[in-house]
Image: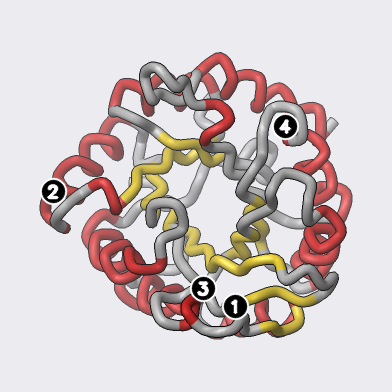
Amino acid sequence: MKKTPNYLEDRICLNVLANSVQNAIDCYKAADKHVVLGVLSKNYPTDEEAIRDMELYQAATENALSVGLGAGDPNQSQMVSRISAKLQPQHINQVFTGVGASRALVGQDDTIVNGLVSPTGKVGLVNIATGPLSSQEPAGEVSIETAIALLKDMGGSSIKFFNMKGLAHIEEYKAVAKACAENDFYLEPTGGIDLENFEEIVQIAVDAGVKKIIPHVYSSIIDPETGDTRPEDVKTLLSLIKKTLA
């Protein structure tokens, strides 16, 4: 099974949620395979059920599986690490403090493991206190460069910058993109991204020179009636990615 995402031009890969195996297949085709499909660990009562179900997603999409927490819930951190050890997905979502465990348990360097940091309201500083206990304490504010170095120490691949709240934290995000480019680290913007602001957010990372970018687009492209991610919107996102790389 291929353990690395299928990046467009070796640069950008989408991350969207899949509501079912069929929805995953439809979105995978719509993105021309340049996507990882998020399935949330929080939706499963046991590891065994999560593994059994997620294996179906892997089989249907050439392992384009992104194991998710569930709205960034830090209490899912250990479950994500445990099931990822068995599944060997292309992509793992983690809180900052869960990165080392995920990398150690997955036992290889190909799978992308992100580490969640939050905006602080201060350009150049991010909050790394996103773990089960640390998220209950005052923010742990460190420089972006230090956060990247810590993530590298733990075997992380990328910074997951959450919550973007669309363009609300754009200056902070620009500083994060610049630091990722300068320190050879990947970037995953997420939170409040939609069809309107997507191109600008991705373009900032492209222009900064970030090596690999995995933008997450979730609720804004989900059909409220069915809970499915709309494949036609995924197609639109793919065309916007192509524009940013043109």
User: In the rendered image, which residue does mark 3 sit on?
Assistant: 130
Dot 2 amino acid type: Glu
Dot 1 amino acid type: Ile
Establish if 64 lies above or below 123: above
* Side of 168 where 225 appears, left or right: left
- The label shown at residue 49 is 2
User: In the rendered image, which residue does mark 4 sit on?
Assistant: 241
Dot 3 amino acid type: Thr
- Which of discs 3 and 4 lies nearer the camera? The answer is 3
Q: Residue at x 45, y 65 (%)?
A: 94
Instruction: Give me the C-alpha separation between circle 3 and circle 4.
Output: 29 Å
Give yes or no for contact between labels 1 and 3 (Cβ–Cβ under 8 Å): yes
Q: Position of residue 109 (x, y in %)?
A: 45, 68
Label 4 or label 1, whichever comes before in sequence order: 1
User: In the rendered image, which residue does mark 1 sit on?
Assistant: 128
Label 3 or label 2, whichever comes before in sequence order: 2
Dot 4 amino acid type: Ile
Label 3 or label 4, whichever comes before in sequence order: 3
Label 4 crowding class (10 Å Cα cut-off): few <14, some 14-19, many 20+? many
Q: Quadrant of the C terminus?
A: top right
Establish if 147 lies above or below 102: below
Circle 4: element type: helix
Circle 1: element type: loop
Give yes or no for contact between labels 3 and 4 (Cβ–Cβ under 8 Å): no
